[in-house]
Each structure stands twice: as C-alpha cells, then as structure tokens.
Image: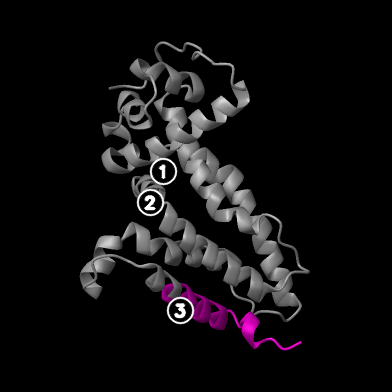
Amino acid sequence: MTDATETETLQRPSQSSESNGATRERNERSILSAAERVFAQYGYRGASVQAIAEEAGLPKSNVLYYMGNKRGLYVRLLERMMARWNALLDDISVEDDPAQVLEAFIRSKMQLSRRHPEGSRLFAAEILGGAPFLQEYLRGELRDWVQTRAKVFEQWAERGLMDPVDPVWLIFLIWSATQHYADFEAQVLGITGKDEITDADVERITQFLTQVILKGCGVRPPSAVTG
C-alpha cells in the first residue's frame, strides 16, 4: 500500500459533548501507541493505516484526520521517541552537577527503553536503514540539540568538573548503551540464559553503566560527593 492510498477520506471524526481537546489528546495517544507496535512489527513498508486503526480501535478516517498520512505518523512517532529520550537534558546549564545530570540521564534512558521497547527498536531500524525519513530532523533540530548540550559539557570540563572528553561521542555512548537492552534483547537473553530482563536486572545495568561512564569521564558519582 502506498502513501497516496493512505491519504484518502480526511473527514473530521464525530465528536460527543466531551471536550474536543480532550478527545483529540486521547485519540492521538491511542493512535501513536498503536502505530508504535504496528511499525515495530511490520516496518514502514509492511504497516498500513488500516492496521494501525484496528490496533487503536478507531476508524481509519480518524487516524487520517489526526495524523494526515502514514509518512507523517511515522515521522511524528520517531521524533516523539527522541523527544522522550532527551527531555532530561533540555534545561541543563553549566551550574548543574554533571554527576547528577549524567546519572539521571542514564537512568531515565534505561527506564524509557524498558517502557517503550517497540519505539526504541523502531528508531534503530530507521537508522539502520539509512534514516530515509529522518534526515531533515537529524541534520537540523537534533544536531542543534546535541551541539547545545555539548557546549555545557565542555564548560564543565573547563571548570574541572569532568575530564575533557568529546561531548558528542559521550552522548552517542549513552544513547547506544542504554538502548542496547531493548534493541538487542534477544541477544542479551540468549547470552545470559534469561527468559526476560527484570526490573532488578535494569537496576543493575543502570548502576553498572553509571559507574563506567562517570568514571570514564572523570566524574565522581553523587554518592561519593561530600557536603
């Protein structure tokens, strides 16, 4: 099914007496959650708006009304995943403690990958495929985001709060390390002999990554900092 056939019947969905805004928010959440599962299972080419609508329990016309078309929905889903991952670093400043920021970022990323494994795998598949739908986002908004955070990391290094490691490579490292356990879950389970990754496993992994990354950056963990 092509994008052209996915743009048909853009009719406004019927509304009850409930607030239009609340209805839209609820429906968009349902659509995005359903799309995350369908795209992760079938990929972009194999997924269809009809399948997403059925997964969300909504008419296809509603999905098209709220999201426009399959391509728009797919891109929005990927960008939402990145926004979730990076929200914790949105407001960091040179006045913050790098140990607390990095530990919280690692923990947040691990928890998000735990709660949204389909979204993490979907993003990984898009990147492995050459990121055909995300080039504008990667070269524009996300590049600017990374460069802004990198400047804060460099200022921390100048103040002696961490070693002068390359901040861009550090961000890549945290992204990849925290997403690995969702994206390559089958590998992790096969090698460890586990049936599933438990909450206790996630906590141990989080502590391990925090220890290794902070030590590699010359940052003392928050628990080691005395008042």
Is 224 contained in the magenta span? yes
> Is residue 169 visible from the viewing direction of this image?
no
List the residue tagged with mark 3. 208
What's the distance in space between the residues labelled 3 and 2, CA to CA?
A: 23 Å
Q: Do the residues labelled 1 and 3 touch (CB within 8 Å)?
A: no
Residue 162 vertical position relative to residue 37 in the rendered view, above or below: below
Mark toward the start of the polypeptide (1 vs 3): 1
Which region is colored magenta?
Answer: 204-227
In this rendered view, identify the residue nearer to me: 191 or 146: 191
In this rendered view, identify the residue nearer to me: 12 or 19: 19
Is 207 contained in the magenta span? yes
Q: What residue is shown at x 43% (from left), y 67% (from top)?
A: 177
Specify the quadrant of the image occupied by residue 153: bottom right
Of tags 1 and 2, the one toward the viewer is 2
Q: What residue is shown at x 38% (from left), y 45% (from top)?
A: 126
Residue 147 point in image, percent of width and height: 64, 56
**Element class at badge 2:** helix
Specify the quadrant of the image occupied by residue 16: top right
What's the distance in space between the residues labelled 1 and 3, CA to CA?
A: 30 Å
List the residue tagged with mark 1. 131
List the residue tagged with mark 2. 124
